[in-house]
Image (spheres, coloured by chain):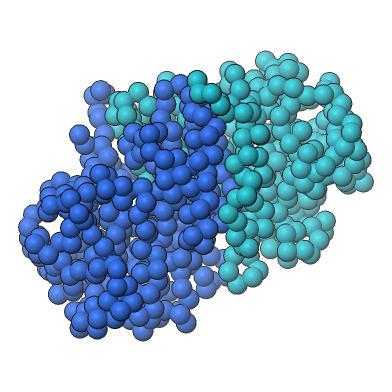
Chain colours: A cyan, B blue
Amino acid sequence: MPDDPLPPEDVLVRLLTRGLAQSARTITGPGDDCAVIQLPGGKSRQLLKADAVVENVHFTRAMPAAAVGNKALCRAVSDIAAMGGAPCEALITLVLPPDISLTWVKGVYAGLNKAARRWGVGIAGGETSSAAAGSPVVISVCLTGELPSDADAGSGSGSGLNSAAVRRSGARPGEVIAVTGRLGNSFASGWHLNFTPRLREAQWLMLHFPPTAMMDLSDGLAKDLPRLAAASRCGWDLEVTALPLRKGADTAAALGDGEDYELLMTFRPEVWQDLAAAWKKQFPRVPLTQIGRITARRVKRPALAGGWDHFQA
Amino acid sequence: MPDDPLPPEDVLVRLLTRGLAQSARTITGPGDDCAVIQLPGGKSRQLLKADAVVENVHFTRAMPAAAVGNKALCRAVSDIAAMGGAPCEALITLVLPPDISLTWVKGVYAGLNKAARRWGVGIAGGETSSAAAGSPVVISVCLTGELPSDADAGSGSGSGLNSAAVRRSGARPGEVIAVTGRLGNSFASGWHLNFTPRLREAQWLMLHFPPTAMMDLSDGLAKDLPRLAAASRCGWDLEVTALPLRKGADTAAALGDGEDYELLMTFRPEVWQDLAAAWKKQFPRVPLTQIGRITARRVKRPALAGGWDHFQA
C-alpha cells in the first residue's frame, strides 16, 4: 500500500473536485446524480452521466452476461430518472482482458441493447480497449438525458432556468422523506442485476408531484440520506422501523447493503396525502413509503454509519 | 484463453454494433471519431465521444501523473477536433485499485484540469470506482462537443443538416490526402503524453478550407487510412516517401506506431495549392503534408499492414 492511500470516497471526490475547470454552461456540476448543462440556444438543458461497473466489484463473470449489460445501462438510467429527466443517447466503453470470450462480450451487448430499447436509449457509439491478462472487465456508460420543458412540468416546478432538474439540495425542514420500492438484500436476491430503474415513476412525479429533492439509492440509505441532507443543509429524523424491507433483508441490510436503485425523495408535507393516494392507483405494485422527516441541520436521528464506500475496507 | 477469443478490433466493433439500439436523434452513430446527435429544437447538433486510457496499455504509473491526465483528456479533444467541432463538457470516470496513492490521483486531476482550461473544456462531473488489488488504473473520459453553425461554416460545407460535421465518409477519387504534423515514434519521444490536439488547426480549416473527410490518427496510418477509405468507399495511392517523419521514426514507424494524434484529411484537388500556402502562414510550425491521393475503390497502393490493434498480439 502507498504512504498516502485513498481517503473515503466522499473525501476523495471533494479533494478532486476542488478548483475543477468548469464552464459557464454547467448549471449543476459534480455532487449530484447527473450534471446539468445549458445547451446552445438558451432554452434546453441536458443531463450528463458517466458510470462504470467493474468486474469483481459490481459483477462477476459467472453472472449472465446480458444481465451485466442490463445493469451497466440501467444504473445510468436510474441516475437520469433521479434528476427528473428522460434518457437519450449512450456511449459504451469496454475494457477487455485477453482471456474474455467473444460470446460473453456479445452477451453484454445483447443486455445493453435490450435495456436501451426498453428505456428509449439510443446507443450512439463507444470504444473498446484491451487490458493486460488478469485485469477486470470494465464497462463504462456515458448517458445523456433531457429535462421536461417548463410547459410540461408540474405546478410545483416554478419557472427558473433550473426548475425542471430535481437536485439533492432542495429539501427543507418539515418535509416528508420517502423511498420507492424495497431496500436491502440487493445482491443475494439478484435485484442488483435485474432491477427496474424508477424512470416511469420519476416522470409521473415530475408531472404531478415534483419532489423537492431526489437521488437514487446506490450506496445504501446510511450513505445516501446523509448526502442528500448535507446537500440541502438539513438533518433527518428517520423512522428505522418504517423502512420497506426486501425479502431476506433486515434493517441493517436496508441501511447498508447498497445497490437498491430506488428513489430517495422529499416532498412538501401538504402534498403527501394526495400523492400517496394517487401513487397507489398509478403504481399498485411499487410501494412508496414515508420513512421520516427532514429536520434542522443539527438533528441526525439516528446517527447513520455503514453503507458502501468504494475506498474503505 | 477462451475457445472463442476476441477477433481483431474492427471485426469486434462490426459484430457489436450490428443491430444496435439507435435513436432517431442519432445522425452519425458508431464508426466515426464521434457520434453526431440532433439536439431538441431542431437546429443544433452535438458531438459525443467516450474514450478510455488503461494502465500498461496507454500509460504506466512511472509516467508523470499530470501527463497521464493530460493525455486522457486530449485524446478526446482530438476526436472532437477531427469532426470539425469544439469541445464543451467532460465527465471523468476513474477506476482505482487499492495500491494507488492519493498523490498520483491528484496529479492525474491536475493534468486533466490544466488540459481542460487550455482547450475550453468544463469538467462537469464524474465517478470513482474501486477495483481489486492488481487491477490497472482506468481513466475514462466522456466529452461533448459543438459544431459550428451553418452561418460560421466555410463555403464548402453546403447547407444540409449534417453539413458541419466532417466525417470519414466524404472522400472522393482524385482528392488530396494530407496529414498534419509528423508521424511515428510517439512513445519514445513522449509525444503520446504531451501532444497538441489539432483543435485550432481543424477549426481554422472548417472556416476556410473544410476537408471532405477527416479523422484523427490514433492507431497508425496503416490502420487508419484504410478505415477512412473504406468509410468513403474509395481506395488510396499513398506516397510512402512523402510521409512526414518524427525525429527517430522511419517509414514503418510512421505507418505503424500509432498514437500520432494528427489529422488525416482529404481535400478537393483544386483548393490544395491555396490551402497549402495559407496554412504555411497560419501555422508555420506545424507541417501540412500531401501524402497521396484518394483513388477508386480497387486501388490500394501500397497494401497496408500493421498499426495498432487492441485485440491482436
Left or right of B273, for residue A112: right
B125 or B242: which is nearer to us? B242
Q: Relative to B29, does residue A92 appear above or below in the rendering?
A: above
Q: Relative to A220, does residue A294 appear above or below in the rendering?
A: below
**Number of marks in the rendered image:** 0
B86 or B166: which is nearer to us? B86
Name the residue: 41% across, 60% down. Answer: B80
Name the spot of residue B38 as percent of width and height, x first.
49, 65
Name the spot of residue B255 as percent of width and height, x first.
16, 52
B224 or B282: which is nearer to us? B282
Name the residue: 25% across, 37% down. Answer: B311
Is any atom of residue B185 visible in this view? yes
Q: Quadrant of the C terminus of chain A?
A: top right
Left or right of A177, for residue B255: left
Left or right of A246, for residue A48: left
Q: Relative to B69, does residue B225 appear above or below in the rendering?
A: below
Q: Quadrant of residue B180?
A: bottom left
Left or right of B68, for residue B174: left
Is any atom of residue A53 visible in this view? no
Name the spot of residue B181 as percent of width and height, x first.
26, 63
Name the residue: 64% across, 55% down. Answer: A36
Name the spot of residue A308 as percent of width and height, x first.
64, 25
Name the residue: 61% across, 35% down. Answer: A12
